[in-house]
Image (cartoon, helix red, strand yellow):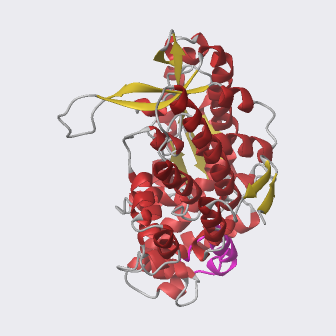
């Protein structure tokens, strides 16, 4: 008997648990507590404050990524045979399970949580948390992977940690056309209801080719450039490739970097930073945060308590469910932020783009605001957001400058980075920064506008 799931993006997703060991393993992994936790983490964090339908989870997304990875693995086999090479079934197995588990390490509100941790000096990204969860001998994931074959857990964790590709199977989980992007671009478009940015998925997949590109050596490596196989697209898929990148651009502009979404992220970041400072400092953390003793946030942010077990206890549902308690906190920042988020009483946004596209005019207005409201910028009553910038290769928390993350087209049989062939892509390659201020008081926002 096969197992089936219905998905709004991919339709019927079938797991052949009787005849395919990898799919049987994938199906069992879905029921582990570590994977079920992804039901409680939204794929788009707080985007539902702006797009009410954006309540899809990293659980659904991860299953869609596994399904997309199966398609890419079949493409690899097709293309390697076309080139007279033999597919590597063991590496394909690693890539498939890595695709399924790639998001295990996301914290609550994902990249917002990472920014809070970065500010505290705890620079452990979600990829590292994912690898740690997979390797954890006391967890549920590692025993299943080791039962599949000895050393399998380390192979999967190692693939997810690698920043520099070694072969074509790495492209399934990290490339310009990886399984993650093939799912989230379509899923996020559907669930937010945005009409722009269609993707000709079937045509793109039909025109994927495997070819070597030249990569710069990793930092500290004196071996020189390397040649590594990755996904490229046939020349006749150039228009679809342009639309694929334009879809990403549009989603970043209209969804991921939406001013209200960014404002909520900044507010949650301020709340979590205040809780973290209180939990790791001196004094009565229970009274100051409003959280009960032993609450997962207090355990995690407590001194020396950032373990896999405490990390896995954190999710979006936990924090949203704790807002009412934190609204009664003795700490004024925690109390205010929690109450505002609970009631959607958001800070008011001022985007400097309102003053026109001229950069000089924007800079002048920024300096004026920073001088006029210096005290409130210092105490957090006004939040400055200058971390967002959009370009055709923009990736949240990403490394779009790496060559294997860029899209290549076969031009006369030679892999060529798409901006050299497309005027459209080249025109959008330079990053466009956003600079916004979020005001606790509407009167301050209105004064800054005048």
In this rendering, position of residue 71 left or right of residue 141? right
Residue positioned 77% across, 63% down in the render: 2
User: In the rendered image, is residue 160 in sight?
Assistant: yes
Residue positioned 46% across, 49% down in the render: 91
Residue 115 vertical position relative to residue 149 in the rendered view, above or below: above
The quadrant in which residue 135 appears is bottom left
Residue positioned 47% across, 52% down in the render: 90
Residue 116 vertical position relative to residue 205 in the rendered view, above or below: below
Residue positioned 68% across, 36% down in the render: 251
Quadrant of the frame with the C terminus: top right
Quadrant of the frame with the N terminus: bottom right
Residue 148 % position (x, y): 51, 68
In this rendering, position of residue 156 left or right of residue 109? left
Viewer-side residue, 245 vs 332: 245
Viewer-side residue, 434 vs 382: 434
Residue most toward the bottom?
293
In this rendering, position of residue 100 left or right of residue 186? left
Viewer-side residue, 254 vs 20: 20
Residue 83 % position (x, y): 49, 26
Identify the magenta region: 313-331
The quadrant in which residue 248 appears is top right
């Amino acid at each position: 008997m096969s197992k089936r799931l219905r998905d709004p993006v991919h339709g019927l997703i079938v797991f052949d648990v009787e005849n395919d060991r990898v799919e049987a393993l994938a199906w069992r992994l879905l029921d582990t507590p570590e994977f079920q936790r992804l039901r409680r983490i939204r794929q788009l964090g707080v985007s539902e404050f702006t797009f009410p339908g954006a309540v899809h989870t990293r659980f659904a997304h991860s299953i869609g990524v596994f399904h997309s990875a199966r398609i890419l693995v079949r493409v690899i086999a097709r293309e390697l045979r076309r080139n007279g090479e033999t597919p590597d079934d063991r590496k394909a197995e690693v890539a498939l399970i890595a695709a399924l588990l790639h998001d295990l390490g996301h914290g609550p509100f994902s990249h917002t949580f990472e920014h809070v941790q970065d500010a505290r000096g705890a620079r452990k990204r979600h990829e590292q948390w994912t690898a740690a969860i997979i390797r954890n001998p006391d967890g549920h994931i590692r025993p299943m992977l080791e039962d599949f074959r000895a050393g399998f857990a380390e192979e999967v964790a190692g693939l997810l940690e690698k920043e520099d590709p070694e072969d074509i199977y790495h492209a399934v989980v990290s490339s310009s056309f990886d399984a993650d992007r093939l799912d989230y671009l379509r899923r996020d478009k559907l669930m937010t209801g945005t009409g722009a940015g269609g993707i000709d998925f079937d045509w793109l997949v039909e025109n994927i080719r495997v070819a070597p590109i030249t990569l710069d050596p990793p930092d500290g490596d004196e071996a020189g450039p390397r040649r590594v196989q990755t996904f490229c697209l046939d020349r006749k898929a150039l228009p679809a490739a342009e639309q694929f990148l334009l879809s990403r651009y549009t989603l970043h502009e209209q969804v991921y970097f939406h001013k209200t979404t960014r404002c909520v992220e900044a507010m949650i970041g301020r709340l979590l930073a205040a809780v973290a400072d209180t939990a790791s400092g001196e004094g009565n953390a229970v009274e100051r945060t409003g959280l009960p003793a032993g609450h997962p946030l207090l355990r995690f942010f407590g001194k020396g308590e950032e373990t896999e077990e405490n990390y896995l206890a954190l999710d979006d549902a936990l924090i949203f469910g704790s807002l009412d308690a934190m609204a009664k906190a003795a700490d004024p920042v925690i109390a205010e932020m929690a109450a505002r988020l609970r009631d959607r009483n958001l800070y008011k946004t001022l985007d400097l783009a309102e003053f026109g596209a001229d950069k000089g005019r924007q800079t002048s207005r920024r300096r004026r605001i920073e001088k006029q409201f210096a005290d409130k910028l210092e105490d957090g009553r006004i939040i400055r957001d200058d971390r967002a910038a959009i370009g055709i290769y923009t990736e949240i928390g990403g490394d779009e400058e790496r060559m294997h993350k860029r899209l290549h087209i076969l031009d006369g049989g030679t892999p060529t980075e798409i901006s050299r062939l497309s005027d459209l892509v080249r025109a959008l390659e330079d990053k466009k920064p956003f600079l916004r201020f979020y005001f606790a008081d509407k009167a301050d926002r209105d004064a800054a506008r005048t």
